[in-house]
Image (spheres, rainbow, N blue to C red):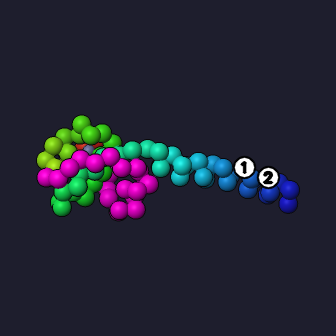
């Protein structure tokens, strides 16, 4: 029982740490209507064709928007 408790205490900070990283990591999206992906770099050539603006956004937010990763820079 004591072992289980220790294991839980050990795992919880790890879980909150991974979501914390998603909030601090920035990715780049195009705000154009045809854009469906997000990018690791704003220099990505997938963003060159962007009809809107290139916007910096946190990884946690972009996942909520349901965008997929770019095939060029990921
Ligand atoms: Zn890209």
Quarter location, residue 61 = bottom left
**Which quadrant would the N terminus be assigned to in this image?**
bottom right
Q: Is mark 2 on a helix, strand or loop?
A: helix
CB atoms at circles 2 and 1 under 8 Å apart? yes
- Percent from the top left, x then y, of residue 42? 27, 40
Q: Does the magenta stretch include residue 5?
A: no
Number of numbered markers: 2
Q: Nearer the viewer, residue 21 or 74?
A: 21
Q: Name the residue under label 2.
A: 6
Q: Quadrant of the C terminus?
A: top left
The residue depicted at 86 percent of the width and 56 percent of the height is 2
Specify whether residue 64 is in view: yes
User: Residue at coordinates 19% horizontally, 40% vertically from top-left?
Assistant: 45
Q: What kind of element bears circle 1?
A: helix
Q: How crowded is mark 2: few (under 14 residues within 10 Å), some or many (20 or more)?
A: few
Image location of residue 57, percent across then percent down: 36, 50
Say left or right for 46 vs 27: left
Q: Residue at x 44, y 54 (%)?
A: 60
Residue 10: give its label. 1
Q: Does the magenta stretch include residue 52?
A: yes
Q: Which residues lie in the magenta part?
A: 51-69
């Amino acid at each position: 029982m004591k072992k289980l408790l220790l294991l839980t205490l050990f795992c919880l900070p790890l879980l909150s740490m991974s979501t914390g990283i998603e909030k601090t990591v920035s990715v780049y999206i195009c705000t154009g209507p045809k854009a469906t992906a997000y990018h690791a770099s704003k220099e990505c050539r997938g963003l060159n064709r962007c009809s809107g603006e290139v916007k910096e956004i946190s990884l946690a937010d972009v996942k909520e928007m349901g965008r997929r990763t770019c095939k060029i820079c990921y």
